[in-house]
Image (cartoon, helix red, strand yellow):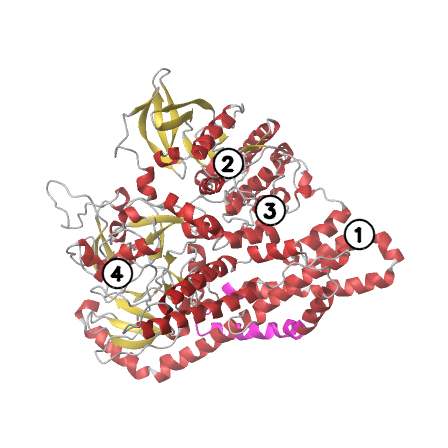
Amino acid sequence: MTDRLEEALALYLTFDAQRESREEFLDRHDEFRDLLEPMFDDPDQALEPEHEDDSGRRLGDFRIVCELGRGGMGVVYEARQVSLDRRVALKVLAAHMTLHPTAVARFKSEALTAARLDHPNIVDIYSVGSEGDYHYFAMERVDGLPLDEHFAEPPDDPTELVRCLVQIAQALHSAHLAGVLHRDVKPSNILVGRDGVAKLTDFGLAREQGLPSLTATGEFAGTPYYVSPEQAVGAGDLDARTDVFSLGATMFELLTGHRPFEGSHSQEVLGKILRRDPVDPRQHNPRVPADLAAITLKALEKDRGRRYATAQALADDLKAFLGGNAVQARQLTRTGRVLRWARRNPLVAGLSTALAAFLIGGAAWILVQNAQLRETLRELRELSDIRVVSRLNGDRFRVAAARQEDAVALGAWLESSEQVVARSAQHRANLAELRARAEPYDPTVAARDRESHPDFALLTRVQRLIATGKRVLSELEGQPAAADRAGRLRRCREHIDKLCRLERDLEQRVGTRRTYTFRDTADQWVHDALRDLVDALDELEGEPWGTRSMVRRWRDNLLSAEQQCHHDHRGDWERVIAEVASDPRYAKLPLVPQFGLVPLGPDPESGLQEFAYPAAGAIPKRDARNRLVCTDDMALVFVLVPGGSFLMGAQLPDDVHIDGEECRDRFAGEMEGPVHEVRLEPFLLSKYEMTQAQWRALTGREPSEHRAGTYSFGRWNTLGQPVETIAWEHADEVLRQHGLLLPSEEQWEYAARAGTRTAWYRVMGVPRDFALVFNFADGRIKRELPGVRSAHALDDADDGYAGLAPIGSFPPNPFGFHEMLGNIGEWTGSAYHRYGAKSGHRILRVIRGGCFYDPIPSLRCSARMPYRMQDRASEFGVRPARALQVAR
């Protein structure tokens, strides 16, 4: 095997599908793409055991009972060791990995490394073996859950969690004393048994200190959200403190429900790990004790010299917390307090604390250099604006913008921001003057700035597309003249020109200097605080999507909504109220004008009334056939759904009920049943999935991975595509701010079924017919993204899109809703639970509808998928709902 293939395989083994997408991974390792892509081909088949059900099968001394889970390296089974009659967990190397000696060596290394560690909080390894082409090792079977499932949400009392963390810190210290670094500490690699004992597992990335790694030079091993700064830059001199950082990141997540460093892709996460300090955990969860927050932040120090020197030191501080004793993390020197303020975001530290620490710690300096002190105090007072600006920006998603009376509060907010805006020019001038004295820009730092920029991966992708386009253009120019040659040449050149314009824009952003260093420590302190202040001012003042611009737009929208509702469209409201009252489907609903909505009249096919929400865009027009014309800048459109009863859920066919009859479905999952009757009152639900333009109109933000103006899946992305890569908690916050809601599961399924009881809202013929109605995993996506769920893609189907389609691209269901199934998964407001349960899961929420790379069975009306409230992915979107006001 060549060295290059060895490196590619080592990289492949670090892939974690739960933390980054296949494309993100390939973009990060583009130089190995030709070798990595085949390793991803048909992953489900590659990991599939020889038999559909391996229960009862025997490997050596072990009889398989059931599958527990699977990942990039292979499958973990529950098994019984025959000779000793004991339960074990049996990890089996995937068949396709046995072809690579490095994979086999890594697999055995994992077992042997863990086997020589003897600690009650490290999973025991019992034996290593092989049989034929199968390699396996047996380990202790922990009857419990991963740490992040055991503590599914931040605990009110952290005592049990801290006890678990103490155990893991001691386990890590034991491993470190034995010369082993874990390098992949994260919640899913910590198991908590029913007895409350925590166990560290998965030493697949472990290595002995001082020995070379199997990963390529300059590449990090680990999971992006939890790697230390030194791991992120591929440093070779890792020590125990890198595992301390990862355990600190784990602690932060379990205490707050948020990861310390979030991002829409791995490069953004790594950039934040390198450059941004985590916020105080108490900003996310005020119930976190101050001492525990301090311990967490000390473990997450960027400078490893300021972290706990050993995992045992971390364990000791955690035990001190449990015992109510003073913790090391809070015992800062006076100088340390000044340093802590200077390094941290002033919003977190607070100016008053900083000034007090500065005055106390610098008493001797005050006596000697009074003039310098006065100047420094003046600068610090100016920098207090960071607190004001941060508060103003923080209000962006807190101020209400839904009712007429909210306009007054928004106007008052705008007035309160005037004074700090007046000082903006001076702050910017001070920063420019200070940067003129900075040290020369080190090329290594410049390269790191560039590669950690959130748009670097996109720039790399665009440059690759330009190179491909130029090759195609060259081939076209060399071909003989043909009827369509001129048109193809023109389109190709236009495509390349558009990509080159995007490349120039990205180069300007990615190439901007972001790191400035100073010989004088005081200059560095002031610079970093000024930088944060100017960044916050950019967010506050930016046009057209800065905080002030958005608040001004919200206020104006509310003022115009009053005019539209009671004056401009008064006649339209009178007409629609009369039509609803006379429509038997609405059962004499006593409708009243809905503040902020404009009547559009009934849909020509469904007959249901529709309304525009101008705060999110332009009021759409109807064509000659009275159908709405979708444009990139159109407003949200709400359908008034009549109330009624329906059968919710699905069950498997049986001897009495055949497939397709009365919610009987051969694909039905356990959590989709039992079928039960639900009655709903009338409600408003968006006719389309929310677009990128509509989200930006309400928030000023562009969270989408495939945002407008970028190129992916063989197409230019547009503002008319669904917004994606948004977490439930953020979607819920934004929609409520504007008087909107996430629909309940019941509302969503009722609207999707639209009076039908089949798996899909229409009876489908041959499989390829699905492409006429839904955007799903078809032959086109298989061509664009080889290996992405290719085993489930319908090769002979083509729905016209490899990725996301603009809204309105596919036919509506009987209620007039477009893309209810496929295109993008849609968050609902409902907690995940078994039907009939009194309450749902406190942190899991349900996504419905399936997405563009899901197979057909995932697109059924009853299909449910649970995800955590903070999870974000490019297949997660929203279809807003709105409460209905009626006459009382």
Is residue 196 visible from the viewing direction of this image? no
Classify residue 550 as left or right of residue 280: left
Image height of 360 relative to 189, above or below: below
Going by the image, does 674 lie left or right of 230?
Answer: left
The image's mark for residue 799 is 4
In the figure, 771 relative to 113: above or below? below
In the rendered image, residue 98, in percent from the top left (x then y), is placed at 38, 33
x and y, in percent, of residue 694 in the image: 40, 69
Of residue 581 and residue 426, the one placed in the foreground of this image is 426
Q: What stretch is highlighted in magenta?
A: 396-424
Of the two numbered discs 3 and 1 in the rendering, the one whose residue sits closer to the viewer: 3
The residues bearing labels 3 and 4 have C-alpha atoms spaced at a distance of 44 Å
Q: Closer to the observer: label 2 or label 1?
A: 2
SS category of the residue bearing label 3: helix
Disc 1 residue type (three-letter)? Ile
Chain-order first, disc 2 or disc 1: 2
Per the image, the residue denoted by label 1 is 360
How far separated are the C-alphas under marks 3 and 1? 32 Å
The residue that disc 3 covers is 229
Q: How many numbered tags mark residues here?
A: 4
Task: Tell me the CA gap for discs 4 and 1.
Answer: 69 Å
Q: Distance between the residues labelled 2 and 1?
A: 46 Å
The first of marks 3 and 4 along the sequence is: 3
Q: Mark 1, residues whose alpha carbon is within 10 Å: few (<14), some, or many (≥20)?
A: some
Q: What residue type is labelled 2?
A: Leu
Quadrant showing the N terminus: top left
The kind of residue tagged 3 is: Pro
What SS does tag 1 mark? Answer: helix
